[in-house]
Structures are given as structure tokens and as C-alpha cells.
Amino acid sequence: MKTILKAKNVTKTYGKKGSAAYTAIRDLSFSMKEGEFIGIMGPSGSGKTTLLNMVATLDPLTNGEITIDGIVVSSKTENQLADFRSQKLGFIFQDFNLLENMTVFENVALPLSLQNKAVKTIQSRVHQVAGVLGIRDIIEKYPEELSGGQKQRTAIVRALIHEPALLLADEPTGALDSKNAAILLDTLAELNRNQQVSVLMVTHDPRSASYCSRLLFINDGQLDRELFQTGTREEFHQEILAVLGDLERRPVAGVRI
Ligand SMILES: Nc1ncnc2c1ncn2[C@@H]1O[C@H](COP(=O)(O)OP(=O)(O)OP(=O)(O)O)[C@@H](O)[C@H]1O
Ligand SMILES: [Mg+2]
């Protein structure tokens, strides 16, 4: 199976070299095969969002290389990246980021409108994906008229409408109650299984993480360990809790440059 994402010796230092510099990700490498559902876990401040933002091409690397779908994104210009993002990546944010003055249709069509697709193409694609996620009935509504679950399904449709090579999510269940969180994760897992959508998701929630096929534990800006789901989801959940407990008992790392 092809490699969809490769991070090679990635380092991110915020601020100027010197007293104010802070290395949030240090010499981190991993790769992801097409169709994997990977979770990124780790304590608060360990560098999860920093890593995801670099993969999302929203934040430049200090060192190293990131390749997505065969393209070395870390050496592209900002203009090239805007095109790349709108074609190859899908995003789900914690608060879903729907545009309030646009209808559901306009919100989910946005990634295709940005690519200047023909109106007919946009309509048929929206109709198709909206059907899969059950939002056809609400397509003319505005975000403020939607329930939490409907907002969340709208956000997923928007993230998938342009068939991205990679779907990125940072704490997508953060704003949801446990029932809606389960629906979102079931949907992601199903899309991953049935349509081979590659998903990279940051989460601090062990139950959300148990839906993933593989987990990367980041500690202090470095890859601490990996965990593969081999048994049931409940068994995986227990394994995750054990690893998190183990990481928490570690002494806090000293000052870094
Ligand atoms: N723009 C920035 N400038 C300077 N330091 C930053 C910046 N963004 C993040 N950091 C620092 O980098 C480290 C990693 O931050 P990051 O947001 O990646 O953590 P996280 O693992 O996502 O944490 P959380 O679970 O709380 O979301 C933190 O110590 C943070 O203070
Ligand atoms: Mg974060």
C-alpha cells in the first residue's frame, strides 16, 4: 500500500535561537500508509497541535521534511501550498468552523468553489456526499439553525467533499457530548474502513483514540511509542489508559533549547 504521509526528522523551534527559543517538536519521524486511521496522543504541551499544523502545511518546519501523497510540501512556497491544501487536505476543527452567513450547501461546497469547479459538478458531488452523511434535508439551513450533531456532519461533509488525500482533525470531539462524540468517531471510522480515507487525528481522549488503528504517543516533542489496535476497541481503550498512566508517572523533562 502506498505511503500517504512521511515526516522525516521534523523539528519545530518557536522563536529565535537563544533564550526565547522553544523546541516543540524535535527530530520526529513517522510515516502513514494510505487508509490508516492514526491518532496522535500525549500530554498537554507535548507538541501534538504543532505537529498537525506542520502536516497541514499551516506552519513551516524548522528542520526536516514532510511528504504528502508524493509531494515534498516542506519545500513549497506559500502560493503553491494554498493550492495543495485546497486539493489534497481536509480539515475538521474542534469547533467545526462553519461560516455563519452561509447555508449548509454553501459551507460544504466551499472547497469545490475555491477550486473553481463547475456548478453542476459541485451540485452533484454535494448531493452525493450529503446523502452519505444524512444532511440533504438541512442543506438550505444556516449553521445557527442546526443541532450539534448536524453541524458536525456538515463539517465532515465539507472536509471530504473534494476527496482529500488526507483528512486532518485536531480534537474533533472536544466540543461534543459523549453521544455526539461517538457518532462522529463512528462516522470517521466507517469512512476510513469503507472508503479508505486516511485520517490523522489529534486527541487527548482515550475513548476517541480507541477508534484509531494506530496511535503515536508524543512526549516532550518526540515520538515516545506507537500502539497498534490488535484486539477489540475496549481492549485498545484499556491499553491506551495504561500507556497514558505510564507517561504521566515520568519525571518532567528539564529545560530545553
Ligand atoms: N506560536 C507559538 N510560539 C511559541 N511557543 C509555542 C507556540 N505554539 C505552541 N508553542 C509551545 O509549544 C509547545 C507545544 O504546543 P502544542 O500546542 O503543540 O501542544 P499540544 O500537545 O497540542 O497541547 P494541548 O494538548 O494542550 O493542545 C507548548 O509548550 C507551547 O507553549
Ligand atoms: Mg493542541
Image (cartoon, helix red, strand yellow):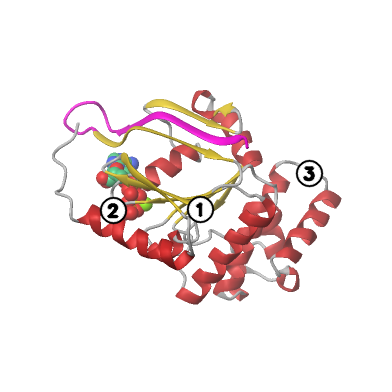
- Name the residue rendered at 30%, 56% in the picture: 243
Q: Is mark 1 within 8 Å of ligand 1?
A: no
Residue 165 relative to residue 254: left or right: right
| Disc with the residue nearer the chain's start (1 vs 3) | 3
Q: Is mark 2 within 8 Å of ligand 1?
A: yes
User: What percent of the width, then of the height, locates residue 120?
Assistant: 86, 51
- Name the residue rendered at 47%, 70% in the picture: 176
User: What percent of the width, then of the height, locates residue 3?
Assistant: 58, 34
> Which element type, helix, strand or loop, lies under badge 1?
loop
Q: Nearer the viewer, residue 14 or 210?
A: 210
View extreme (front): residue: 231
Q: Are marks 2 and 3 in contact (CB under 8 Å)?
A: no
Q: Nearer the viewer, residue 179 or 58?
A: 179
In whole angstroms, how far apart are the C-alphas of marks 1 and 3? 34 Å
Up/down of 139 relative to 57, above or below: below
Look at the image and tell me in which quarter the C terminus lies: top left
| Disc with the residue nearer the chain's start (2 vs 1) | 2
The disc placed on residue 43 is: 2
User: What percent of the width, then of the height, locates residue 256?
Assistant: 18, 35
> Which element type, helix, strand or loop, lies under badge 3?
loop
Q: Amino acid at mark 1?
A: Ser
- Name the residue rendered at 26%, 28% in the picture: 16
- Name the residue rendered at 83%, 45% in the picture: 118
Q: Amino acid at mark 3?
A: Lys
> What residue did someone put label 3 on?
117
> What residue did someone put label 1 on?
213
Residue numbers of the magenta segment: 1-21
